[in-house]
Image (cartoon, rainbow, N blue to C red):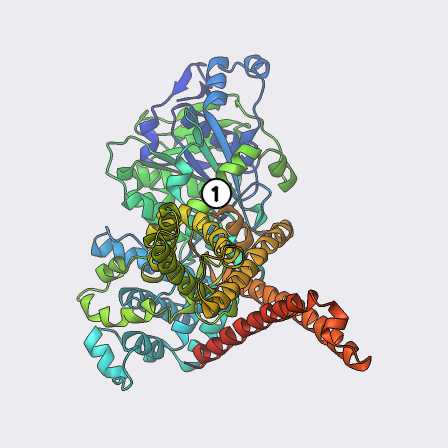
Amino acid sequence: MQLGTNRINDEKIEIHSEVLARHAAMLGSTGSGKTVMAKALIEECTIDEIPSLIIDPQGDLARLCLNTSDKDVEKHGGDVARAKSFRKKAEVRIWTPLRKKGLPICIDPFQTPSANLDQEESITAWDMVAAGFTALADYDMEKPAGKQVRTYLYEILIHMTRLGVKVNDFLALSRAVKSPDKILTDHLYVDEIDKPDWDDICAEFDIPDLTSMLPKSTYDELSRRLAAYSSGINQLLFSNGVPIDIDTMIKPSRAGKTPINIVYLNTIQDEAQKHYFVQEIARALYSWMLEQQSTDNKLKLLFFMDEVAPYLPPAPRNPPAKDLIKLIFKQARKYGVASVLATQNASDVDYKIMAQANTKFIGRFSQPQDIDKVKHLLKEDGGNLDMIKELPSLGPGQFQMVSPDVSRKAIPLQCRWLYTEHGPPFSEEQVEKNTSKALRNWAKDNSAKTTRKIDAHASAATAAGASLGAGNRGMAAAALGADRDDAFEVRLMGGLSVIRDGKDPLYVMQGITNAMATIVLLWSMVVLGTQWRDGELDWTWALLGLLITLSVFLIIGLETFLGHDIELQRKISKFARFSQYGLFIWLWTLLFWEYYYSDYTLGNNLAMVLEVSVVWTTIFMALEGLHRLKLGRLEVNFEGEGVFSKLKDGMGSLTAVLTKSEIREMEASSKEVMTGLRWILDFCTFVIFGAMVWGTVFGKSLEELFGGEGTPHLLKFALWLGSIYLLIFMAQSIVIKNTQN
């Protein structure tokens, strides 16, 4: 890695990338050139094919996406060949939380720690999750109240997850926090009328008394604060973009590229949210590290934090990300992660973390407190203090490099010329302009592929002595769909996307339509088989009817009995759409035969059922087509990637887990469709009723109004209209019953 030249003898200064495995720090006041030094280090790592993850609070590092010319590099004594190598390999991605100016990125605070951790690591990981929620709820963890809340959330998370309660969004967590005894009792004894006392439940399932860990007022206040993150601008932090995933970040979108991931924090205006976002990035990195194999100083990733003072202040201050970053610095080496931090105020950073950086690039300092801090750091390392007196006189790009792995003495370093542009911080408009469409498409694809992992075994490893088997009786609650937080977007034979909870009228209408179609298919298969046996029908039609019936039964059966298995349903999802269209065409074919092929008949009663089934199925097909057009228009108006975008991207899938805000969006969409359907029905009814009133007033019969041939068609239309009203009435009756249960 070429860092620059020796200021005294002009020799090139090169280090091996493994030197960074023991971490580095860049110190220097404003104008010292530490950002240039940081960029040079990132460029060298990229040439060595080491991906990087960069926290950029001010937008200084985002300019890495702008390359300088070969002429400019050569003019300033740079290595043109290495500059070309950098340009060939670099894939700069600028991630923008809350906004789509760059690549949108979000956090999933409900991502559970891995089950592969040992107990100590698992306890630490779960504690970090609890710390994140405590910070989000605006409790100061340095004060007794904040420490109590953190401990309480830790217990809530591990025991709820261990016992199978889905705490996977803010409303679910809010309810669990407010009434843990009710949530667990209802979950564990869902099928029992006489439920045991809370004390007995705690003893049986090895649960601490969660109802006595906080003052009553704190339970309510904590619940209220957490619930606030389920709506409004707050939820964009958790839903807008690609969820943080280190594996995704280190993987290039194209072969031969080395990712440079820059997390551009300027899009987050709220300081508390900014701190929380940094903490979640650190948590994701720490969790990823623990899943890696130990390495012999071979680097897998460069983790760089610019302007770390707000996140790593001296004791006793302890902002949310500090503990995690300390853990990363302590353990990253054995997992192949080089951690580098930069600051312009050495006195404002916890020296214990700075001391873990084995290589230090020290630029100009003029303030006595900063010079004293540097002196203290060098004493801790047993370093040479002679270079301290030179610090006030250093120019831009000039550093004293202190690295025992390279030299016993401080090296007077002049940083090399950059292969990328250096200038003022990037604005959001510049970020947007320099984010390519290809990278946006790649990010969108990865956003759709990322799924949340919820692992009860991870919490079981943490809750020492707890029995997983004891909680199995409560799994019936999830199987019965008792928890609305586990709602699904479904795409059944009815076709329209609605909420699968038995409390949405459209979903129930689909179920009734499917039941009616099932009856028709079964009976038509019997009729076709009988006519084939009697030689009245070619065997191909009987076989076709059998195949269509079996395929519809298969898909409805899989959806019914395997609704909990999303991955398995995805595998068969490609057949669902074809079966839906096949059912639609087949029902119309049967109806055509019934009226125009005299040798084929279902019987008068079943013929009416067939006609009603065709009407209902056609209604859903028409609604689906119109609704998709509507969704396409709605998507343009959404800043974030909402449920409509997900539906558009995933039209082939049977199921997709939705967040609480997306469920509400779907419910609103469902109500909108129902309102439109009722309006059309009411309009048609008004037309028919008006015609009848008109005839009554003027003394005309139906035959006189519509003609002798038109009357049967009018009556048939009235039958269709009545059947749709009947469908709505049955669906709403079932919904009322389900809501009361």
Quarter of the picture holding the N terminus: top left
Kindly identify the residue that appears in the image at 60 percent across and 42 percent down: 101
Residue extending furthest toward the right: 698
Q: Which residue is mark 1?
A: 370
* Residue 83 drawn above or below residue 225: above
Judge whether residue 593 can be spotted in this image: yes
Q: Position of residue 272 (x, y in %)?
A: 51, 58
Q: Position of residue 119 (x, y in %)?
A: 21, 56
Number of numbered callouts drawn: 1
Judge whether residue 168 can be spotted in this image: no
Q: Is residue 339 left or right of residue 504?
A: left
Q: Is residue 84 left or right of residue 559?
A: right
Q: Quadrant of residue 234?
A: bottom right
In front of the other: 42 or 129 = 129
* Residue 514 drawn above or below residue 245: below
Q: Is residue 6 left or right of residue 688?
A: left
Q: Secondary structure at mark 1?
A: helix
In front of the other: 116 or 37 = 116
Quarter of the picture holding the C terminus: bottom left
Q: Position of residue 214 (x, y in %)?
A: 37, 77
Q: Quadrant of residue 296?
A: top left
Q: Answer few, some or many: residues within 10 Å of disc 1's Cα (few below 14, many 20 plus, some between 14 and 19).
A: some
Q: Position of residue 656 (x, y in %)?
A: 43, 54
Kindly identify the residue that appears in the image at 56 percent across and 42 percent down: 58
- Say which amino acid is labelled 1: Asp
Q: Is residue 71 left or right of residue 23?
A: right
* Residue 390 drawn above or below residue 124: above
